[in-house]
Image (spheres, rainbow, N blue to C red):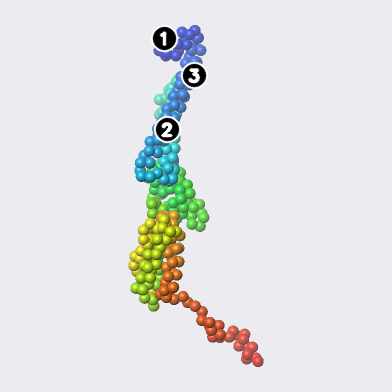
Amino acid sequence: MRDDYLYELFRELGASDLVARTAEFFVGLVLILAGAMVVSRLGSRLARRSIESLVARSRLEPTARSTSRAKTLAGVAASLVRILVFSIAVLLILDTVGINLGPLLAGASIVGVALGFGAQSLVRDFLSGFFILAEDQYGVGDTVTVAEVLGTVEEVSLRTTRLRGVDGTVWYVPNGEIRKVGNSAKDWSRAIVDVHVPAQADINAATTVIREELRAIPPDVEWAGAILDGPEVLGVEAMGPDGWTVRVAARVAPEARGSVTRELRMRIAARLQNEGVVQVAKTPPNQAAAEPPAPEDQADRTSS
C-alpha cells in the first residue's frame, strides 16, 4: 500500500492504478514547477531589493552611476537565485521520475571538477568582474589605465571590460587579468600645467604674474563648477640652462580636466605675454631686405 496522498486520492476517486500513478506524476511535476517559479520570483525580488538598498546606503545621495551599479549587481544576484532554485527543481523532478540521483550527482561532481580546472580563467574573470562592480572601482565613462591601456570605459560586464583608447582603438580586457587600475575620474581629478619661463626672464616676476592670473579664474562663472579647489602655483618643478619650469595645479571635476588644463595654459601664456615677462619672437620689418640675394639673382647680376 502506497503512502502517497495523491495516489490514494485518485484511487479513492475510482481511477485505475496507471491513471492514478500518471496523475500523481503530472500533479507533482506541476507543483514543483509552480513552487520553483514562485520561490524564484520572490527570491529574485528580495535579492534585488537587498542589493539596491545596500548600494543606496553606501552614498548619501544616489547618483546615476550608483543606480546603474545597483541595477547591475541586483540583476546578477537575481540570476544566481533563479539558477539555484531551478537547479533544485530539476533534481526534484528527476527524483520524481525515479532516477537515482546518487550516480548522477557523483558524475556531475566529477564533471564540475574537470570544468573547474579547465575554466579557471573564466571563473576568475566572473569573480573579478563581480568585485569590480561591487566595489565601484570604475564605471562607464571613466578614464582609466587598465593593463597599460589608457582609455574611456564603454562597458563593464562580469567577464570583460571594454575600453576606447585615445586613438579610437577598442580594447577588450578580461577582468581576471586586471591586477591594478588607475582611475582618473574617481570623485575628482587634478589639472597640472607646467609653465616654461626662459632663463633671461625674472622668475619672481613670472611667478607673481601667474598667481595674479590664477586668482581671477575661480570667480569666473563658466569655470566655477569645473574648478573645485585652487588653482595654485606649486613652485619651480625643474630648472636648466634654458630656463625654469613652474608647475600650476588645480583640483577639478574629472570630466573637466582637459578643458581646464587648456584654459589655464591659454590664460597664463596670454598674461605672461601681456606683462612682457615672456617675449614673443617677431620678424623685423627689414629682415627681408637684409637677406642675401638668391644664387640665381647673383648669377644674373654677374652676367649683366
At horizontal 46% and vertical 50% (from top left) the residue drawn is 141
Residue 161 rendering spot, x and y as whole percentages:
45, 47
Q: In which quarter of the view is residue 262 placed?
A: bottom left
- Judged from the image, the secondary structure of the residue bearing numbered disc 3 is helix
Q: Say few, some or many: other residues with alpha carbon within 10 Å of mark 3 (under 14 / 14 to 19 / 20 or more).
A: few
267 above or below 134? below
Q: Earlier in the sequence, mark 2 or mark 1?
A: 1
Q: Which is nearer the eye, 223 or 154?
A: 223
Q: Which is nearer the eye, 132 or 3?
A: 132
- Judged from the image, the secondary structure of the residue bearing numbered disc 2 is helix
Q: Earlier in the sequence, mark 3 or mark 2?
A: 3
Residue picked out by circle 2: 45
Residue picked out by circle 3: 26
* Mark number, residue 1: 1
Q: Earlier in the sequence, mark 3 or mark 1?
A: 1
Work out how far the residue at label 2 is from the one at label 1, CA to CA, in angstroms.
43 Å
